[in-house]
Image: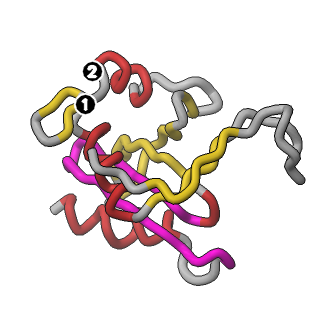
Amino acid sequence: MGFTFYDNFWQDENVESPLPLYQWTHMVMLPRDMLKFGILYKDKGMFSGKRVLSEEWVRKATRKEVTDFKYNYYWWRFNLKIEGQNIYSYRASGFVGQNIVIVPKLDLVVVTINSPSGGGILPNTIIEKFITPAFLN
């Protein structure tokens, strides 16, 4: 898929970290690579006409039937409330506003990045109030 990873890190008990030990990962990706990853999931595991992930894996990771926690396979699942409608979407959410949001009904992938300080309008607000409604009509 041509990703450029600048840093990858999987926390384990042998790595010193200021955070408590949880299984988390750290990837530094360019927005264009985040978009490719979103397209891969939007297209049910296909990218540029080639099968990269099984359709079953993508279905399990992104299905609407969510637990109370609404998180599975590194994806958050939720409804966007747009113009009085609940529109299903799922999101890979990163540090201070880095997001890959897929809205299947609209065939839409949105990538957001934010400053390390997290300043400005929250990406979730931009997606729900401005971007997604533009594709609904």
Indicate which disc, 1 or 2, sits on the residue closer to the N terminus.
1
Tell me what residue is drawn at x 51 percent, y 59 percent: 6
Q: Left of 44 or right of it: where is 48?
A: left
- The quarter of the rendered structure image containing the N terminus is top left
Q: Mark number for residue 62? A: none
- Give the residue number, with chain letter if any, for mark 1: 44
- Give the residue number, with chain letter if any, for mark 2: 55
Tell me what residue is drawn at x 36 percent, y 41 percent: 88
Where residue 124 appears, x then y in whole percent?
A: 50, 63
- The quarter of the rendered structure image containing the C terminus is bottom left
Q: Are marks 1 and 2 in contact (CB under 8 Å)?
A: yes
Badge 2 amino acid: Glu
Residue 28's image quarter?
A: bottom right
Q: Decide whether residue 26 is among the magenta residues.
A: no
Q: Secondary structure at mark 2?
A: helix
Q: Nearer the viewer, residue 119 or 32?
A: 32
Residue 111's image quarter?
A: bottom left
Where residue 83 appears, x then y in whole percent?
A: 32, 60
> What are the residue bounds of the magenta stretch?
97-117
Tell me what residue is drawn at x 29 percent, y 50 percent: 2
Q: Residues within 10 Å of mark 2 (few under 14, many from 20)?
A: some
Q: Left of 64 or right of it: where is 10?
A: right
Q: Secondary structure at mark 1?
A: loop
Where residue 90 appears, x then y in whole percent?
A: 42, 42
Q: Residues within 10 Å of mark 1 (few under 14, many from 20)?
A: some
Badge 1 amino acid: Lys
Residue 54's image quarter?
A: top left
